[in-house]
Image (cartoon, rainbow, N blue to C red):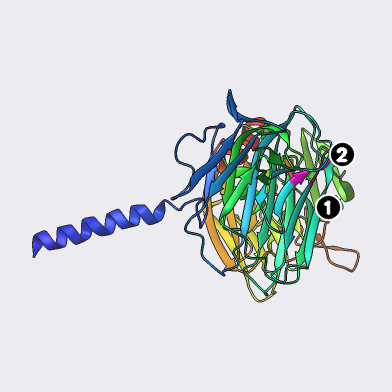
Amino acid sequence: MKLFTILVFSTLLSCAGTLAAKPPFERPPVVFFHNGDISGYVGHDVRVTLRTALEKTGDALKFDGQRSVCRFSIPWLYPDRPLSASYVVDLTLDRLPEKSGVITGRPGFHNALAVRPDGRVTFSCFGRDGKTSRLLISRNPLIPGRRHRVAGTMDCSRDNHTAMKLYIDGALEAADTLPMPPRHYGRELFLGGIDADRDGNAKSPVACAVGNFYFHYKALTPSEICALPGATGKEAWPVMSPVAALDGTGTAKPVFSGNVRRQDGAWHFTGGSTAAWKPGNAPESVTVTAAVQLDALPKQNGVIAGRPGFDNALGVTPDGRVFFNVWNAFRSDSLMIHSKTRLVPGRQYRVTGVAEGRGVETVAVLYVNGQEEARDSIAGPVFPYGGTFFAGGFPDGKGGVRSALDCRIYDCRIYGIALLPEEIAAIEQTTTTKDQHNQ
């Protein structure tokens, strides 16, 4: 009996360790390769059944824009079952195509990512009826010679519709909804073109170098797209720049109201003063991060920064704990997480709140001085907040300020994406003030 107890306990520990190591995605990629290497494993029971005129150069797979094409076969595809999907490709165009060239996709009423002669990316999908379709077109073009991460996602998990989104370098370029499930596509997936003719020439080819490729049966979130491995110069992506920052480096400049003073490297918020940004876009997921020093503990919850109306805010409670709250789109549920650390007036801290919309759920994470202190989730997507952000408190609709906080903010940035812990740490390293870790 004693031996049995030991074995059971050991098994539970093993399972607990497995469960604790949460995978980055609910579903692993169906097809993938890294650094241009398709010589080995490319997915569960997936075969490379055609590879014509491909050249491995450095960390990429070279497509000549004429004959080069690669075909993956997925023998275990479920019949007659519409599936959400994501294509993510790290590629560098050699040149713009003379006519639209397919980067990757599934043939037959094409579901494909392609690039036009003007460099703009398209993402196409047909509905179950074989007649209804949607074509997304990016606002921005790909630049030949520059590596980009291009992604197309389609979510058919809810409402008998297919929500389509197109991203370049992590930023949303276009979105639309197909009013039905997607067509049931076959078991073949192409890269560098959409098929090959009898002579072996690629149909709708594109001349490019592909470093990394991922195909998921899941609509990846922007954070998941950015988190996929690959050296793509992510630090230069517009999505990785703040949409709002107190120093004016964001896409919108702050407008101050009330008694805001700039002194000793900090913005002093007192007496119900605020800063407001109107970047013109309303990101779903956000990261709010600030280097802050309290002048005094608030009598009621005080806001460091965030979005009002079913508040999504990073703030401080009367007992000094940091809080971060967010609502779901159904307005049926919200969450508020709190730090274990209690802020002491007169000391500086780096506090960060992350709200990540994952479609079926919204995840919130709270950090203090780079350490994760709380995490929770609620069912449903993120509430559709407006595009206006505030610091120091929220307007009360009567000309005053609610949730005001008397504090000094040395640095405040808001990003339109759920940053990863290492990205948050990088911000902290570049913006650390002299007393930030003096407790």
Task: Assess whether mark 1 and mark 2 are in contact (beta carbons under 8 angstroms).
Answer: no
Give the residue displayed 28% in from the left and 55% down from the top.
13
Give the residue displayed 58% in from the left and 23% down from the top.
58
Placement of the C terminus among the 4 image quadrants = top right
* Amino acid type at image mark 1: Thr
Give the residue displayed 60% in from the left and 30% down from the top.
54
Instruction: Determine the residue located farthest toward the top in the rendered image.
Output: 58
Q: In this view, does 218 lie to the left or right of 170?
A: left
Q: Distance between the residues labelled 2 and 1?
A: 44 Å
* Amino acid type at image mark 2: Asp
Locate residue 268, reporting x and y percent.
79, 44
Which of discs 2 and 1 lies nearer the camera? The answer is 2
Q: Give the range drawn in magenta.
A: 114-121
Find out whether residue 120 is within the magenta segment.
yes
From the image, tell me which residue sits under label 2.
118
| Whether residue 256 can be seen here | yes
Locate residue 263, reporting x and y percent.
81, 35
Placement of the N terminus among the 4 image quadrants = bottom left
Q: Nearer the viewer, residue 191 or 217?
A: 191
Give the residue displayed 65% in from the left and 67% down from the top.
156
Classify mark 2: residues with Cα within 10 Å, few (<14), some (14-19) or many (20+): some
The disc placed on residue 407 is: none
Instruction: Determine the residue located farthest toward the front in the rendered image.
Output: 198
From the image, tell me which residue sits under label 1.
274
Displayed quadrant of residue 59: top right
15 over 48 or under it: above or below = below
Displayed quadrant of residue 316: bottom right
